[in-house]
Amino acid sequence: MLELNSIESGYGETQVLYGLTLTARTGRVLAILGRNGAGKSTTLKTIMGLLPRKSGEILFEGKPIAAQPFDIARSGIAYVPETRDIFPSLSVRENLEIAAKRFGGSNPEWTMDRVLDLFPRLSERMDNGGTQLSGGEQQMLAIARGLLMNPKLLILDEPTEGLAPIIVKLIHDKLQELKEAGLSMIIVEQNFGFATSLADDVVVVSKGQIVWTGNADQIKADEEAQHTWLGV
Ligand SMILES: Nc1ncnc2c1ncn2[C@@H]1O[C@H](COP(=O)(O)OP(=O)(O)OP(=O)(O)O)[C@@H](O)[C@H]1O
């Protein structure tokens, strides 16, 4: 579904990705693991057109990915960044309506009612401003907004960061529901247990390259890889 071939990318003069190659398959969850600073977020930003690619190619559904972030989103990739990027001056309802209006189309798979069924907590917060939400509620809103873009592929950067264990469990269960419904996902995550319990496939990034590829059961069983690449 999404293929990255020999990607070189970074921030201005600072190169971070050095020939990174990976594949995310349809109907599956890919976890991208790695230590702090390995290049995971940089990989996601490069996919989303937020950082310029120096070389390499990205194919989505077999075709070169669009160049601009908005066109990439339109083509069916929703991105939930680490910063969640809720509009602070808008209410929950307005944050959701923006996505629904821009990406809903005439017969959307995801409607406001459907995302509120998935996250009933948000329906109690519809008139609250983005900044009045707890971290967990902000993460729910960010995921709900991503779903209203009716994506074929949902990309999440550290969805559990800074959240209490009970909320981490809730987010886990919601993503598991989405997986069972057949949604393709890419998840960058520091929480090894969370990532490997959701993922089908796993890649590990170190110094801007993929150093390990396999499935979730294989990395759970591979203590040496965990120790070498993840410091688990
Ligand atoms: N805006 C930026 N400008 C310059 N360098 C950056 C910028 N953002 C990140 N970097 C550098 O790029 C490298 C990779 O960062 P990246 O955020 O992709 O790591 P990561 O694997 O996602 O880890 P983390 O969990 O820390 O986010 C790091 O060395 C980081 O310092």
Image: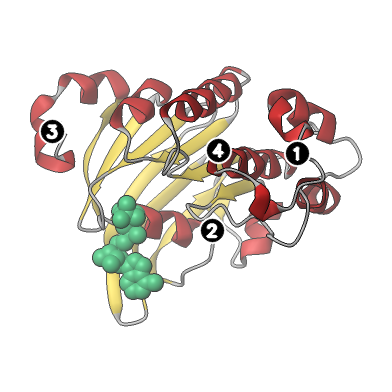
Q: Say which residue label 4 marks.
A: 136
The residue shown at (32%, 40%) is 190
Horizontal side, residue 70 vs residue 128: left or right = left
- Earlier in the chain: of badge 3 and badge 2, it is 2
- Residue 48's x, y, as percent? 54, 58
How many neighbours does mark 2 have within 10 angstroms: few (below 14), some (14-19), or many (20 or more)?
many
User: Label 1 sits on what residue type?
Assistant: Arg
How many neighbours does mark 1 have within 10 angstroms: few (below 14), some (14-19), or many (20 or more)?
some
* 1 or 3: mark nearer the eye: 1
Quarter of the image where the C terminus is located: top left
What colour scheme was applied to this rendering of the protein?
secondary structure
The residue shown at (56%, 57%) is 65
Q: Say which residue label 3 marks.
A: 225
Q: Say which residue label 2 marks.
A: 48
Disc 2 to disc 4, C-alpha distance:
24 Å
Labelled pair 1, 4 in contact (Cβ < 8 Å): no
- Earlier in the chain: of badge 1 and badge 4, it is 1
- Earlier in the chain: of badge 2 and badge 4, it is 2
Extreme residue in the front direction: 132
Instruction: Answer above or below: position of 225 versus 127.
Output: above
Disc 1 to disc 2, C-alpha distance:
29 Å
Disc 1 to disc 4, C-alpha distance:
12 Å
Instruction: Answer above or below: position of 28 versus 142.
Output: above
Disc 1 to disc 3, C-alpha distance:
43 Å
Q: Which mark is residue 125?
A: 1
Horizontal side, residue 128 vs residue 30: left or right = right
Label 1 lies in ligand 1 vicinity (Cβ under 8 Å): no
Indicate the secondary structure of the residue bearing disc 3. Answer: helix
- Residue 158's x, y, as percent? 42, 44
User: Label 2 sits on what residue type?
Assistant: Met
